[in-house]
Image (cartoon, coloured by chain):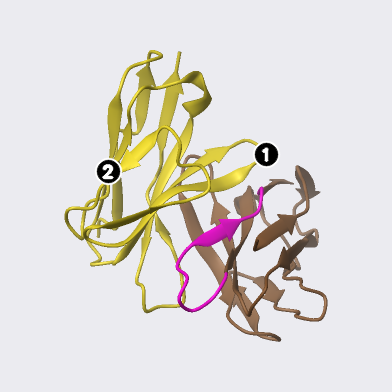
Chain colours: A yellow, B brown
């Protein structure tokens, strides 16, 4: 009954460090996405993918990279972390043929010092 | 572009009070509309949805009606409980071929015993 699994749940980085947030889903969903959640701003879409080998940018893609080599996995890479990337990150997935219900992971809280 | 505006919080209520959270949207086509709920320390989960005008979504005592004439999807519950304390997000999916969801800023609701 895993659903969408994100790791790590918490991470502290120094400015300039790089890291990868992992996301895996076991529901065979074609669509996967990354959001960041900031106070008063709701959720903003960073990157998304409609299938293996296909990725595209959302509203706030700068400073982040993604890849989709398998249906199950959709990692988010921070190349050179900045304090402005301090946020809670959510991975979400859905079927492309469905009504659009997104299934969310529990979130990853990132602090950049 | 397509967007969602929801009432700002926080909202504090007593148990058994009536809850309304306003949500209006801007969209060029015929979007699907959603309410998601985020309990403390958790990811978002779907509360209810409506896919066409005049549809009413309902779940756990919450209701929302898709009003095309007023471009609204207000969330209501007749008698709230302490367990309803959460952040509520209104969201929009633009069309059947678009899998991205646009979220409102979220409304924090606290119910006091």
Q: Secondary structure at mark 1?
A: loop
The quadrant where residue A46 appears: top left
Residue B100 within the segment the image draws in magenta:
yes
Mark 1 is surrounded, within 10 Å at the Cα level, by few (under 14), some (14 to 19) or many (20 or more) other residues, namely: few
x and y percent of residue A51 in the render?
27, 64
Q: Is residue B77 left or right of residue A74?
A: right
Numbered mark located on residue A75 in the image: 2
Q: Is residue B95 left or right of residue B99?
A: right
Q: Residue at x 28, y 66 (%)?
A: A29
Q: Residue at x 68, y 85 (%)?
A: B53
| 1 or 2: tag closer to the N-terminus | 1
Q: Which residues are magenta?
A: B94-106
Q: Which residue is mark 1?
A: A40
| B92 relative to A12, above or below | below
Q: Nearer the viewer, residue A54 or B62?
A: A54
The quadrant where residue A71 appears: bottom left
| A9 relative to B39, above or below | above
x and y percent of residue A36 in the render?
49, 41
Q: Mark 1 falls within which chain? A: A
In this view, the residue farthest toward the left is A70
Numbered mark located on residue A20 in the image: none
Q: Is residue B40 left or right of residue B73?
A: left
Identify the main secondary structure in magenta: loop
| Residues at marks 1 and 2, CA–CA distance in whole angstroms | 26 Å
Q: Residue at x 49, y 79 (%)?
A: B96
x and y percent of residue A107 in the render?
41, 41
């Amino acid at each position: 009954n895993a659903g969408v699994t994100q790791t790590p749940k918490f991470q502290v980085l120094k400015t300039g460090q790089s890291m990868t947030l992992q996301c895996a889903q076991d529901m065979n969903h074609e669509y996967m996405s990354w959001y960041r959640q900031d106070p008063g701003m709701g959720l903003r879409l960073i990157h998304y993918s409609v299938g293996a080998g296909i990725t595209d940018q959302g509203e706030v893609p700068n400073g982040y990279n993604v890849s989709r080599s398998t249906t199950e996995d959709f990692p988010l890479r921070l190349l050179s972390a900045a304090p402005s990337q301090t946020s809670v990150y959510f991975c979400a997935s859905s079927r492309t043929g469905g009504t659009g219900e997104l299934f969310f992971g529990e979130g990853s809280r990132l602090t950049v010092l | 572009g397509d967007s969602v505006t929801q009432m700002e919080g926080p909202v504090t209520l007593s148990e058994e009070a009536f809850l309304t959270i306003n949500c209006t949207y801007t969209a060029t086509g015929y979007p699907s509309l959603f309410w998601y709920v985020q309990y403390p320390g958790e990811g978002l989960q779907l509360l209810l949805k409506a896919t066409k005008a005049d549809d009413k979504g309902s779940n756990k005592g919450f209701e929302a009606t898709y009003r095309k004439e007023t471009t609204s999807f207000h969330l209501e519950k007749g008698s709230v409980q302490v367990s309803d304390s959460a952040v509520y997000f209104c969201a929009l999916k633009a069309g059947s071929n678009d899998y991205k969801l646009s979220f409102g800023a979220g409304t924090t609701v606290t119910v006091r015993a």
